[in-house]
Amino acid sequence: KMSGKNKNKHITRHSRLRHERDMDGIEEEMMATVSDHMDLLCCHKVQDSLLSSASRFTDYRGIFNWCVIMLVLTHAHLFLENFIQHGFLVDLRKVIQHLVEDNY
């Protein structure tokens, strides 16, 4: 038989372990609840890069449009720079005359 002192230690230890286990359960529930709320509030989700082969993404229209815009802006900059430096060097009368002539 256990003496009163040892019995109290055993009960106290048992109670403490049960309390810790209960607190762990409560903590896990709180973390799950917080995680659920974070999922609702988060606007980002983990996904593969659109440029990787694993994403199965096939609509590259936006990337193509961005490339066209960059190409046009770059060439517009060069055209404007040349026009400022050298002026308009094309003789429009000769161009129109060449287009109107029937060479065939």
Image (cartoon, rainbow, N blue to C red):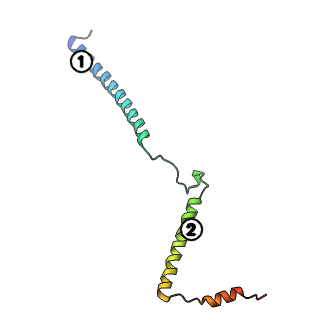
Residue at the far right: name it.
104
Residue at position x 31%, y 26% in the image:
20
Q: Is residue 51 left or right of residue 2?
A: right
Residue at position x 56%, y 55% in the image:
52
Q: Nearer the viewer, residue 8 or 45?
A: 45
Q: Amino acid at mark 2?
A: Val
Q: Is residue 86 left or right of residue 94?
A: left
Q: Which residue is mark 2?
A: 68
The percent position of residue 1, horizontal first and vertical second, equals 27, 8
Q: Which residue is mark 1?
A: 9
How far apart are labels 2 and 1 at the CA level? Answer: 79 Å
| SS state under label 1 | helix
71 above or below 30?
below
The percent position of residue 28, horizontal first and vertical second, equals 38, 31
* Label 2 vs label 1, nearer the camera: 2
Residue at position x 28%, y 19% in the image:
15
The percent position of residue 80, horizontal first and vertical second, equals 49, 80
36 above or below 5?
below
- Disc 2 vs disc 1: Cβ atoms closer than 8 Å? no
Residue at position x 50%, y 88% in the image:
87
